Amino acid sequence: MATLNGTDLGDIQSEDQTKDSNLLQFPLPASDSSDAILIDIMGCFRTISLSGIITGTVATQNTFIAAIEGLVDGNQGSGFTFVSSQAGTSDKTVLISSFNWNKQAGDVNKLDYSLTLFQGGI
């Protein structure tokens, strides 16, 4: 079960994590890529992209929306604990980059959403 700051993220449909080393890249003119100069001085960062489904009454869905939107309030402090749906991975401190939810008229008991998180804190 995936959670964000203790809030159950429901049925995770996809979880994508990218850890980027943020290398400085200097290709050399008239040279192959094997001759490029790569410098690792900028540190790294992780982006976590989630899509999920919350099922339940409209009240349950609204509670979920309020909980997540309440975290994205312009003052995320030192971050929130994200527990992945992938068993065996460590918990991560994250800030929320974006939260998007989508309601389909044909299924009143289902709310689709997506979250983009950045690992780190202040």
Image (cartoon, rainbow, N blue to C red):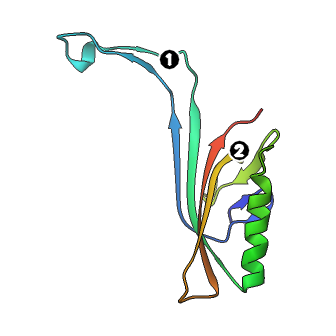
For the residues labelled 2 and 1, the Cα–Cα distance comes to 24 Å
Residue matched to label 1: 40
Number of numbered tags placed on the structure image = 2
Does label 2 or label 1 sit earlier along the sequence?
Answer: 1
**Is disc 2 surrounded by few (<14), some (14 to 19) or many (20+) residues within 10 Å?**
many
Which residue corresponds to the image point at 73% horizontal and 68% vertical from the top-left? 65
Residue 95's mark?
2
Q: Residue 96 at what x, y percent from top left? A: 68, 48
Quarter placement of the N terminus = bottom right
Left or right, 44 with reference to 29: right
Nearer the observer: mark 2 or 1; the answer is: 2
Looking at the rendered structure, the secondary structure element under dot 2 is strand
The quadrant where residue 33 appears: top left
For the residue marked with disc 1, what is the amino acid?
Asp
Residue 111 is left or right of residue 6, and the answer is left
* Nearer to us in this view, 11 or 110: 110
Residue 26, horizontal then vertical, whole percent: 35, 14
Q: Residues within 10 Å of mark 1 (few under 14, many from 20)?
A: few
Q: Residue, x 53% and y 38% (percent of image)?
A: 19
Instruction: Give the answer, above or below, for where 43 lies relative to 18.
Output: above
Q: Is residue 68 left or right of residue 41?
A: right
Indicate whether 117 appears above or below 14. above
Percent x, y for residue 70? 80, 58
Where on the picture, by quarter, is residue 95?
A: top right
Residue at x 76% of width, y 80% of height:
60
Helix, strand or loop under label 1: loop
Frontmost residue, 30 versus 21: 30
Q: Amino acid at mark 2?
A: Leu
Quadrant placement of the C terminus = top right
Residue at (51% x, 28% y) in the render: 21
Q: Residue 84 falls in which quadrant of the image?
A: bottom right
